[in-house]
């Protein structure tokens, strides 16, 4: 047991060292050099960086070149990181997933002496960083959706005061808090550095996958093509967005019981298994050592996942 633990600690140390040496250290060095170069200058992005430059998949050039070949495959991860507002690169996210997965795989395999159980636990653990980024993206979009009507109102007031649309976008980017302000600053910078306003608006709708943002882009593009009072259109759009937000809150309140039920059905078996492990470990050993117990455990896990997904689909009401 001591030898196995020593091997695990040694492998873990090697993996952490390699990850720090080839991934974290170059990224920190490049980030420090970039901060040093930008410190005396105004915090403005160049036109190439805003319009044309592709996002780096890794600070390590060789790793970036290798991942660039899988550009279409890794595009969902890059878009997910962008929605989350994270400065983490795709390579860092992948390395974190692989590292956590390998650590859990080794730990569970050494503890249970079963490679299948270790592999299953490792695959599940490897999904944790992606799940964390996905949760951060969801929280950011929820905050964006809550603050977006204020930005639309600001645009409408600016247009009524006689400002141009581009100036109104700049004011919204400077006066509205994150994440709405950051997206409007990026929208203004893109059109300011040469991208056409329709293309910049479509890129904005692509970065923010919300129906409200698509309403906004459609309203502005339609007004630019057909004419009309854009400030009045934005006032009506702001009212519609607020009403939709109220409906969403009401739906969440009405579906709270179902969501809590689904969460309870997932947590209860885990809590019972943990309690039995402490109180009567011999009963839990049957589910791990006996072949029939293993089959029953896997069947229960699959049924729990199916039940959770079914309840989640039921309470996820489109509004």
Image (tube, rainbow, N blue to C red):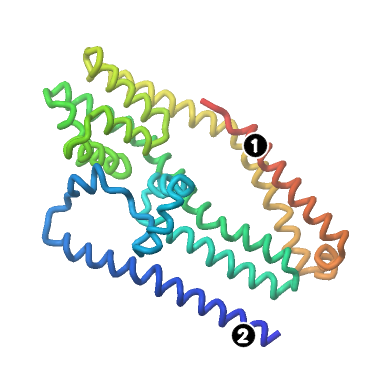
Q: Is residue 101 left or right of residue 16?
A: right
| SS of the residue under disc 1 | helix
Q: Earlier in the sequence, mark 1 or mark 2?
A: 2
Label 1: how many Cα within 10 Å (few below 14, some 14–19, many 20+): some
Residue 290 falls in which quadrant of the image? bottom right
Asked if marks 1 and 2 touch (Cβ < 8 Å), the reply is no
Q: Quadrant of the N terminus?
A: bottom right
Q: Residue at x 49, y 29 (%)?
A: 248
Q: How many marks?
A: 2
Q: Residue at x 43, y 52 (%)?
A: 69
Where is residue 37? Give x, y as percent.
Answer: 16, 63
Q: Which residue is mark 1?
A: 258
Q: Is residue 146 left or right of residue 167?
A: right
Observer-nearest of 202 and 42: 202
Q: Is residue 222 above or below residue 208?
A: above
Kindly identify which numbered label has been placed on residue 6. Answer: 2
Where is residue 73? Give x, y as percent.
Answer: 49, 47
Q: Residue at x 27, y 41 (%)?
A: 181
Observer-nearest of 41 and 71: 71
Where is residue 41? Give x, y as percent.
Answer: 12, 57
Give how far apart the Cα atoms at labels 1 and 2 are. 47 Å
Between marks 1 and 2 in the image, the one whose residue lies nearer the viewer: 2
Observer-nearest of 198 and 63: 63
| SS of the residue under disc 2 | helix
Q: Is residue 50 above or below residue 224?
A: below
Q: Residue at x 55, y 65 (%)?
A: 100
Q: Is residue 118 left or right of residue 39?
A: right
């Amino acid at each position: 047991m001591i030898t196995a633990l020593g091997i695990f600690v040694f492998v873990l140390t090697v993996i952490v060292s390699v990850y720090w040496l080839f991934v974290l250290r170059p990224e920190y060095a490049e980030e420090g050099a970039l901060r040093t170069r930008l410190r005396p200058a105004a915090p403005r992005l160049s036109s190439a960086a805003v319009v044309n430059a592709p996002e780096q998949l890794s600070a390590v050039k060789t790793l970036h070149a290798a991942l660039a070949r899988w550009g279409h495959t890794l595009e969902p991860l890059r878009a997910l990181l962008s929605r989350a507002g994270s400065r983490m690169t795709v390579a860092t996210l992948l390395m974190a997933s692989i590292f956590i997965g390998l650590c859990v795989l080794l730990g569970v395999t050494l503890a249970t002496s079963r490679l299948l159980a270790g592999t299953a636990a490792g695959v599940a653990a490897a999904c944790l960083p992606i799940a964390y980024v996905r949760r951060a993206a969801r929280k950011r979009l929820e905050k964006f959706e809550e603050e977006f009507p204020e930005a639309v109102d600001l645009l409408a007031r600016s247009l009524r005061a006689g400002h141009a649309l581009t100036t109104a976008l700049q004011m919204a980017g400077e006066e509205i808090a994150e994440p709405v302000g950051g997206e409007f600053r990026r929208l203004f910078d893109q059109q300011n550095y040469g991208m056409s306003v329709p293309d910049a608006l479509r890129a904005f709708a692509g970065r923010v996958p919300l129906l409200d943002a698509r309403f906004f882009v459609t309203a502005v593009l339609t007004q630019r093509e057909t004419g009309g009072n854009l400030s009045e259109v934005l006032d009506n759009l702001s009212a519609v967005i607020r009403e939709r937000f109220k409906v969403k809150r009401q739906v969440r309140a009405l579906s709270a019981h179902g969501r809590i039920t689904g969460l309870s059905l997932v947590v209860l078996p885990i809590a019972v298994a943990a309690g039995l492990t402490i109180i009567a470990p011999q009963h839990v050993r049957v589910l791990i050592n006996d072949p029939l117990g293993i089959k029953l455990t896997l069947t229960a896990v699959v049924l729990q996942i199916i039940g959770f997904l079914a309840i989640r689909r039921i309470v996820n009401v489109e509004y």
